[in-house]
Image (cartoon, rainbow, N blue to C red):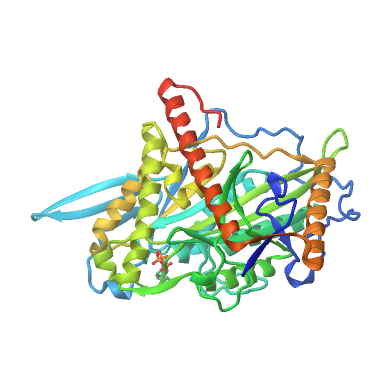
Amino acid sequence: MSCCRICLPETLPAQQQGSKARVSLGGGPGSGWRQGAAASPFYSSSQGGAMASGSSSKGGSKDGVNVQVVLRCRPRNGIEGRSPEVVSCYESRREVVLHQNVAGKQQSRTFMFDKVFGPGANQTSLYDQAIVPIVAEALQGFNCTIFAYGQTGTGKTYTMEGANCGASEGDLPNDAGVIPRAVKQIFDHLERSQIDSSVRVSFLEVYNEELTDLLDVDDGMQQAARSKLKIMEDKTGVVVQGLEDCIVNDAAEIYQVLERGSAKRVKAETLLNKQSSRSHSIFTITIHIKETTSEGEDVVKIGKLNLVDLAGSECISRSGAKDGRAREAGSINQSLLTLGRVINTLVEHSGHIPYRDSKLTRLLRDSLGGRTKTCIIATISPTAMCHEETLSTLDYAHRAKNIRNRPEINQKISKTTMIRELTVEIEHLKEELLAQRTKNGVFVPLERYQETELHHSAMAQKLSSLEEQIEAKAMEVGVQPTI
Ligand SMILES: Nc1ncnc2c1ncn2[C@@H]1O[C@H](COP(=O)(O)OP(=O)(O)OP(=O)(O)O)[C@@H](O)[C@H]1O
């Protein structure tokens, strides 16, 4: 009979769930702390550098800020043949015009965005103009999310990851996308300011409503065989239980991690894209920076950058998706549909927000209407062949501009709290290690374990539905829900 071992005590403190710090790649220091000029081990009294500030936890505007929406139109590609161009981009006016010929009459619709990048815009100009300020905010201690949304084959992965950048060192290639450039900006900043800091990354895949860890060491394993992770919610927000958080010591290490994880994403050829990503991916960079308050107390400032590459929205018949691929496309569209419903409800203030209807929206909850600073990069094709999907992307993205978030700088953690949490984590890890070695953990038969799991998930569903009812009731009577 196969058995599952459960070590007691089972759980880590809330903040540490899903943050199984792993030995750093490339053999750097185990703690993962990069030390500034005057640093002593772990913490030093060096003055944090340009960004050091007091220990206040609020930094955002009270009324909130709108989600930023950037529009990018890629150049035409080989697949589009001679299909005429129907999109005009006016970068300085921040406008996009979509033309259509209806019964011999020219009709056009104009959309305005926070920034517009036409087919001639390269990766550097998009990054410098639209992304640099967001990454700077993550370095100041905000949670920030940048996500690419658009029809399949319109350049989401090209925009987020880029092309030909692999595990590069030194200068980035011209085709490098947002992720490698953000990594470079972060490490350049930390090196320049000589502050004590640590950087961790995780890489999550959402495929057919299942979550897998793209950094898990499961070489060669098919997606279906990889272990599936669970989403948990606690006071600190959404956590993915069991997701590895790798400590990285320099930009080159992150490029390796990105390349390794990206190679594992589910991809397939469709009629619209030879290398179509069939999953959503979330690459998260967490930055811990040490600061000293004016009272001389050492505190840690934490900033987070979520870089999301969504699977393409697509018309199933036009993309050539069949059987398993059609189910996949159905699941992709389903989660994007939920994302659309979440956006609509937020914009129209029309009651209950269906975050819980898909894994993607549960994960992005704080980025849409929450405390995160969010930027959406909407990608489109310039040709008539994609007119319908382009219109849908433009409508969707234009609507998203009205979402208001209330970003707040993350609460700084004092040295004492951090040491206490790390000590607890070490104790738990020691207990797990000892139980592994001596096999004296708690063993239960697989069937009983599965029963308990079923019971837990039924309870969790019941709790969710109760929470939803409370939220809906609170909306009805116009009070802020406290759950
Ligand atoms: N702005 C651009 N400049 C040059 N080439 C581009 C641009 N955008 C996309 N491409 C090229 O178009 C092709 C499709 O792009 P990509 O795979 O990034 O699309 P996608 O939106 O991520 O598609 P899917 O949703 O199917 O994964 C790639 O070969 C990519 O290199």
Q: Residue at point 38% right, 61% down?
A: 312
The C terminus lies in quadrant:
top right
Decide if residue 272 is in sight here.
no
Residue 470's spot in the image, x, y percent? 47, 29
* Above or below, 181 relative to 63: below
**Pick the front one: 302 or 127:** 302
Residue 250 shown left or right of residue 168 in the figure: right
**Pick the front one: 451 or 37:** 451
> Across the whole image, how many numbered discs are drawn on residues?
0
* Above or below, 408 relative to 70: above
Decide if residue 314 is in sight here.
yes
The N terminus lies in quadrant:
bottom right
Residue 53 occupies quadrant: top right
Residue 18 occupies quadrant: bottom right
Residue 245's spot in the image, x, y percent? 67, 59
* Residue that lies at the very extreme toward the bottom in this rendered image: 220
* Above or below, 79 relative to 110: below
Residue 151 shown left or right of residue 161 in the figure: left
**Pick the front one: 339 or 71:** 339
Residue 268 shown left or right of residue 11 in the figure: left
Q: Residue at point 83% right, 55% down?
A: 36
* Residue that lies at the very extreme toward the top in this rendered image: 477
Residue 273's spot in the image, x, y percent? 36, 72
* Residue that lies at the very extreme toward the left in this rendered image: 103
Residue 345 shown left or right of residue 8 in the figure: left
Residue 321's spot in the image, x, y percent? 30, 69
Q: Residue at point 44% right, 61% down?
A: 121
Figure quadrant, ligand 1 = bottom left
